[in-house]
Image (tube, helix red, strand yellow):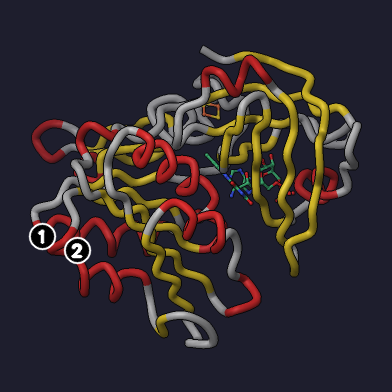
Amino acid sequence: MSIQENGKVVSCAHLGGALFELTFEAPAICAAAQPGQFVHIACGEGNLLRRPISICDVQGDQMRIAFQVKGSGTKWLSARKAGDMLDVLGPLGHGFDFARLGERPVFIGGGIGVPPMLYAMKQTKAAGAQPTAILGFRTKDAVILEPDFEEVGTTHICTDDGSYGVPGFVTDELKLHVESFTGVAACGPKPMLRAIAAVAEEAGLPCQVSMEERMGCGIGACLVCACALKGENGETKYGHVCKNGPVFDAKEVEW
Ligand SMILES: Cc1cc2nc3c(=O)[nH]c(=O)nc-3n(C[C@H](O)[C@H](O)[C@H](O)COP(=O)(O)OP(=O)(O)OC[C@H]3O[C@@H](n4cnc5c(N)ncnc54)[C@H](O)[C@@H]3O)c2cc1C
Ligand code: FES
C-alpha cells in the first residue's frame, strides 16, 4: 500500500559534510511504515523523478530521514526549512522480516546505509529482541546517528581509516562476534553486502540485505531498478528493488 501525503517539514539539520537529517509530518505514511521500507520524495520542479530515501525513524506522526547530497534532488531536499511542504509517496517496498532474524539480531550499516538500521533496531527491541548494531564509516567526520543507536542497544562503530571507534571494516567486527548473533540484517554498498552475506552463510546465520539500484517510478512499473536474483536450476531471474525489495534474503541475490 502506498500513500501520497503532503507533509510539513519539522526540521532540516546539517550533520556535517554532505550529510543532512530531515524530519517531516506524514501521519498516514508513518502509521503504515515498516523498517527497511523507503519513501519516494518529489524534489522540486526541476527534478522530474522522485528520489528514494530510506525510513530512518518514525515517532508518532513524524518521519525522520538522513541523506547525503549527491545531485540536484538531494541538494533541493537539503535546502528545505521548517514549515515547507514535502510531497511524499510511501511507504514503499518490502522491509525486514524480523521473525527470521531471531532473538539476537545484528544490524549492520555502511555509510549512508546506516539510517534505515535505526528504525529496524528500535522495532526489534520493542518486540523483545536484543539487537546489536555494527556501523561502518570512512572516517570520524562521517559518523552519524551514534547516540540514537546507543540508546537502543550495543553499538560498534568502525572506521576505514581508524580515526574513530574500531579500525577496519564492519565484516571484521561481525566475524569477531558472529557466534553471539542469531541473524544478520545489512544495508550499504554492494561489495560490503556481498562480504557480509558470505560471513553469515559460513556461520549458518539467516541474512537479509537492503539493495540499492537507481529508480524511476518506485512502484514496479518502469523496470529501471532491476536486480539479478537466483532463479531455478542456476538460472538468473530479475526482480525489482522497489517492489520485491529493497530487502532480500541474501541467498536470493545473484552476487
Ligand atoms: C531504496 C533506496 C533507499 C535509499 N535510501 C537513501 C538514504 O536513506 N539516504 C541517502 O542519502 N540516499 C539513499 N538512497 C540513494 C538516493 O536515492 C540517491 O542518492 C538520490 O536519489 C540521488 O538523487 P540526486 O538527485 O541528488 O542525484 P542525481 O545523481 O542527480 O540523480 C539523478 C537520478 O538518478 C537517481 N539516482 C541517483 N543515485 C541513485 C541511487 N543511489 N539510488 C537510486 N536512485 C539514484 C535519482 O533518483 C535521480 O532520478 C537510497 C536509494 C534507494 C534505491
Ligand atoms: S523504479 Fe520503476 S520498477 Fe522499480
Q: Which residue is mark 1?
A: 203
**Relative image position of residue 227 (x, y in whole percent):** 39, 39
Q: Is residue 31 above or below residue 125?
A: above
Residue type indicated by callout 1: Ala
Q: Quadrant of residue 140?
A: bottom right
Which amino acid, mark 2?
Answer: Val
| Label 2, label 1: how far apart the Cα atoms are | 6 Å
* Picture layout, residue 119 above or below residue 136: above
Question: Label 2's element?
Answer: helix
Identified at 58% across, 59% down, the residue is: 145
Q: Where residue 207 sits in the image (x, y, percent)?
A: 23, 47
Q: Which residue is mark 2?
A: 199
Mark 2 burial class by Cα count in 10 Å: few <14, some 14-19, many 20+: some
Name the quadrant containing residue 41.
top right
Q: Secondary structure at mark 1?
A: helix
- The reply, left or right, for residue 251 in relation to residue 6 is left
The numbered mark at residue 178 is none
